[in-house]
Image (cartoon, grey):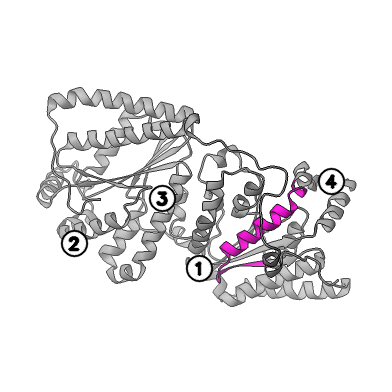
Amino acid sequence: MPDQPPQEHKIGKAELKHLEPLLRDELLAAQTQLRTAGAFSLALIISGTPAAGRSETINELLEWLDPKFVTVHAFDEPDWKDKQHPVMWRYWQTLPARGRIAFYFAAWYNDYLRYALHKPRQLRRHEQRMVERIRALETMLAADQVRVVKIHLHIDAKTQRARLSRLLSNRLTRWRVTPEERWLAQHYKRVEKATQRCLNATDHASAPWHSIAAHDEAYRLLRVGEILRNELLEGLRSAAPEARPALTRPAQKATVEVSASSLRALGLAQYSSPDVPPAEYQRELERLQGRLALLVRRPKFRKRSLVLAFEGLDAAGKGGAIRRLTHALDARQYQVVPISAPTPQERAYPYLWRFWRFLPERADIAIFDRSWYGRVLVERVRGLAAQADWQRAYAEIVEFERQLTQSGCMVAKFWLGVSKREQLVRLKERDEDPLKRFKVDPEDWVNRRFYGDYQAAAAHMIQRTHADDARWTVVAADNKHHARLAVLRTVCETIERAL
């Protein structure tokens, strides 16, 4: 990304008359191929100097494309609902599905520039984290088949003043000049400096910036159209079957390795625990449920939210542990989110999209029965994800949880482990009971053959994603009573530690 604004360019009327129809046809053809292939989506971010022509450019592009498959998003200051969630939450809600295009007015860059221009001291404290968050998002989107195209339209101060004066002089267009744009025009140099700093900091290989001189309207439109066309065509070439590596399943034997000492250190080698007599279990269960009920009703809890993620082997008792939790809660305060294989709709979006959708608001709780860790567990072990995808997932998950905790969300994660012998007993018991048979899926029996792989994958998962504010708790679940009490106790301690 150059530090200096691009040079002015002009397009003659004859050249425009020749080039515009060709480009329009090429864009529409590329969009049609995108819809048919459905292999990727495209997010076009247009930022720019006020009066540089962002709205005009998007309006023209919408006339060239089929608008039914294009969405346009502009973001003001975060409203009360946005503030209930992590900063990036509202942008995740608008991501395009594969086969579609989304246009954004500055998108997540609005937040950076708002701080740079109106809260410079806060920006100095948070700039590095804001840049990290943006670059991580764009890198992840690119890996999940979302082509992020970033275009900055630039004009000089003289051209800006002339255009704003022309708009203000006509009562039919006066409304288009907002108080914010007037302020930005009055502080042109300051805005340019902040903008250039932002562009330089967020220009990277996965999503480079394209800076366009927007003095000539015809050149601006054709240049943006060319970039969009080229990105669509490049995406179609990359998505062609011959361009994609084949995804192969692992062999039936164990393919994930980890040392026995590592398993023991993480508590993944022994899942037996002392028996808890029924009477003692009931007393302790009621005590812990009462403790949890009081904690989530504390005034301080209203300023926080809680996310609980449950992972574990089949028949480990995740559902039973979750039910003992929810018995202590008001049904209006929590949501249990069961996670299974992604639906066709969910597969059309980036991997983490379906989890961002269910994040709780302040004072609420989201309980995930299986979670985003599926990518580094079942998808890794069963060969359902390419190696490059599950390997990058560790860093993406850490970043996701970091955004949760930095927004005030409390996070607790549980691995419920059950021995291979006890698992077999439970699966047979369910199979033989007509009232429990629905709990057993044919895949449960297949997964038993990968028991050792799941243990090793869980060890890697815990080692690479454990954090002080998003801790893993390994629960020995051969004894159901012990496991349920351990989960309740840990949830109470997580809330108490945070509050």
The tag earlier along the polypeptide, 2 or 3, is 3
452 falls in the magenta region: yes
- Magenta stretch, overall SS: helix
**Residue lying at 78% horizontally and 41% vertically, measured from the top left:** 442
The tag earlier along the polypeptide, 4 or 1, is 1
The tag earlier along the polypeptide, 4 or 3, is 3
Which residue has dot 4 on it?
437
Position above or below: 55 against 33: below
**Residue lying at 61% horizontally and 52% vertically, measured from the top left:** 376
- Mark 1, Cα crowd under 10 Å, few <14 / some 14-19 / many 20+, is some
Q: Is residue 282 left or right of residue 486?
A: right
Q: Nearer the viewer, mark 3 or mark 1?
A: 3
Q: Position of residue 257 (x, y in %)?
A: 66, 55
| Circle 1 SS class | loop
Spatial separation of the CA atoms under disc 1 and disc 2:
33 Å
Spatial separation of the CA atoms under disc 4 and disc 1:
41 Å
Q: Please report contact status of discs 2 and 3: CB closer than 8 Å, yes or no.
A: no
Q: Nearer the viewer, mark 4 or mark 3?
A: 3
Front residue of this view, candidates 128 and 217: 128
Which residue has dot 3 on it?
138
The tag earlier along the polypeptide, 3 or 1, is 3
